[in-house]
Amino acid sequence: MQLVIMDSKQLTSSGATKVSEGAGKFLQLSEDWIKEVIRRVPEGKFGDYTKEQLLDLVNQGNCDTYISGIDKATGKLIISNVVIK
C-alpha cells in the first residue's frame, strides 16, 4: 500500500511556490510534518487502526508527496512530486 499526499499551492507567474512551516513547526509535506498531522487526528475520527496504519506507511517510506497548482500563464494544472527534508 502507498500513501499519497497532495497539497495545493498558489504558483507565482514563474511557476514557483514554497512550502511553509505547519503543524509542529515542521515544513509542510516533510515526514515529520506528516507524522505530526496524523498524530493530531482526534481519537475515534478514523479509528486507531487507520492512524496506526498511516504512521506505519510513513515509517516504511511508503509515502509520496506532491504539490499541485494552476499555471497562471496557460491555465493548466501542474502536479509535481516533491521530497521535503
Image (cartoon, rainbow, N blue to C red):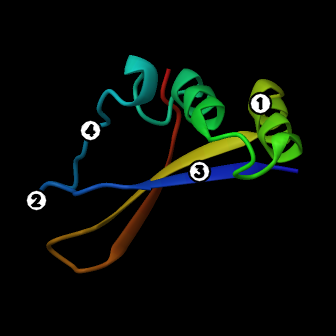
Q: Residue at x 83, y 35 (%)?
A: 52
Residue 18 percent location from the top left of the image: 26, 38
Task: Quote the CA–CA distance across marks 1 and 4.
Answer: 23 Å
Q: Earlier in the sequence, mark 4 or mark 3?
A: 3
10 Å crowding of disc 2: few (<14), some (14-19), many (20+): few
Q: Quadrant of residue 32?
A: top right
Give 45 or 59, whichever is nearer the viewer. Answer: 45
Q: Residue at x 62, y 41 (%)?
A: 41
Task: Quote the CA–CA distance across marks 4 and 3.
Answer: 16 Å
Location of mark 3 (residue)? 5
Q: Please tell me whether mark 1 sits on a helix, a strand or a loop.
A: loop
Q: Which mark is residue 51?
A: none
Location of mark 1 (residue)? 61
Q: State yes or no: discs 1 and 3 in contact (Cβ < 8 Å).
A: no
Location of mark 2 (residue)? 13
Please determine whether, in this image, residue 9 is positioned above or below residue 58: below
Q: Earlier in the sequence, mark 2 or mark 4?
A: 2
Task: Quote the CA–CA distance across marks 2 and 4.
Answer: 13 Å
